[in-house]
Amino acid sequence: MKNIFKAMVVAFLAIGTMAYSAVNTKVEELNKGQSVQVISAPNADGAITPKTIDAAFEKNGLTMGGDNNMNSPFEKRFNHVHYKTYNLAMFSNTDLIVKLIKKYPKFGSLTPLTMSIWSDDTRKTMNISALSLTGMSKAVGIPENDPDLVAYADMVKTALKAAMPKGEFQKTNFPIVDKAASYKQEFTVDVSATDDKAIQELKGNIEAGFEGEMEPLGFLLPNYMNLQADVFDAAGFKDYDIYVTYSICKFDVIYPVSKLTPEAGAWAPCSMYIYHKKGEDKIHIGYLGVDSWITSLGMTDKEAIGKLYEAQGMITKILQGLN
């Protein structure tokens, strides 16, 4: 009798495991083509925090470029927060950045990658949103089967699972984006000089002009990466005189956006690249436009959308004035 009971228990557990696997497979299949992925985990005891999430990412090969508690400035500026926890974080893997930018220079618009971390205070869960492989592919125009892009997406998914050991990826209902051409906001600055000193001086002037215009308008620049000096040179990658990226954020934008679309941190802070390839006569500047947020997340809130386009218009005006 005991043996029969044990056999029944084993069979029941096996069926349960198979069912769990099937559900997860089904969710992944249902989410196929979506640009943003969301993982949620029970957190009634408060054990999962932005710090534990950051630590899990670091242990899985992703260097944190910053993890900002948005509620502190939200409380000061707006006297209200939407969630007990709402953070925007930036992360990257330098080896894969080098490999991808060698092939696709405009991958700087996803360097660093970003995520939002927020609490569902009714369901007592912690949640993370990040770009999926599809989202990364469509945003920058990289084939979805590129091995380095696949490796990067797999690394992100592994880190998400490590950060949320009891978490599950959620069935999302965002629109499927067929084309991402409207995502791209690209600008150039003419270069007449050829010597390195003059090019570096022009870089300094562009950065000073950009920063000087952005900050008075309320934009924050929470992360700056000098990829050429700090990453490419060490890797022996010498194709560029200049390659830097800025992370850009604005409280007046992310506050209304996050109210109904906390997943927007998969795109924010947005990454902007500035690069000059040796021998070319232009400096390239670009970032992913706000259509990436609106389209891939199915945003409909007029106030939030208006704030996004208003901010993009400000950035466009500044970058057009740099030439």
Image (spheres, rainbow, N blue to C red):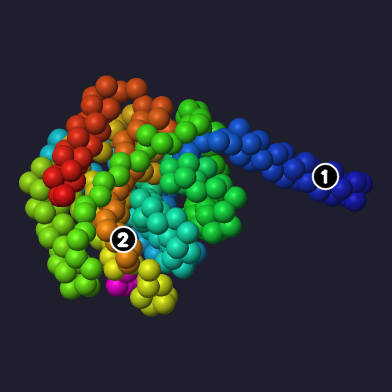
Helix, strand or loop at mark 1: helix
| Residue occupying the point 10% across, 42% down | 217
Identify the amino acid type marked 1.
Answer: Ala
Badge 2 local density, few (<14 within 10 Å), some, or many (20+)?
few
> Is 90 on the left-hand or right-hand side of 128?
left
Place residue 74 in its image quadrant: top left
Tell me residue 233's x, y (percent).
Answer: 36, 75
Q: For this rendering, which residue is in front, 271 or 197?
A: 197
- Secondary structure character of the magenta stretch overall: helix
Question: Where 95 falls versus 262 (above or below)?
Answer: below
Q: Is residue 257 visible?
A: yes
| Residue occupying the point 15% across, 49% down | 322
Question: Where 305 falls versus 5 (above or below)?
Answer: above
Label placed on residue 280: 2
Q: Is residue 230 a member of the stretch shown in magenta? A: yes
Residues in magenta, as a range? 227-231
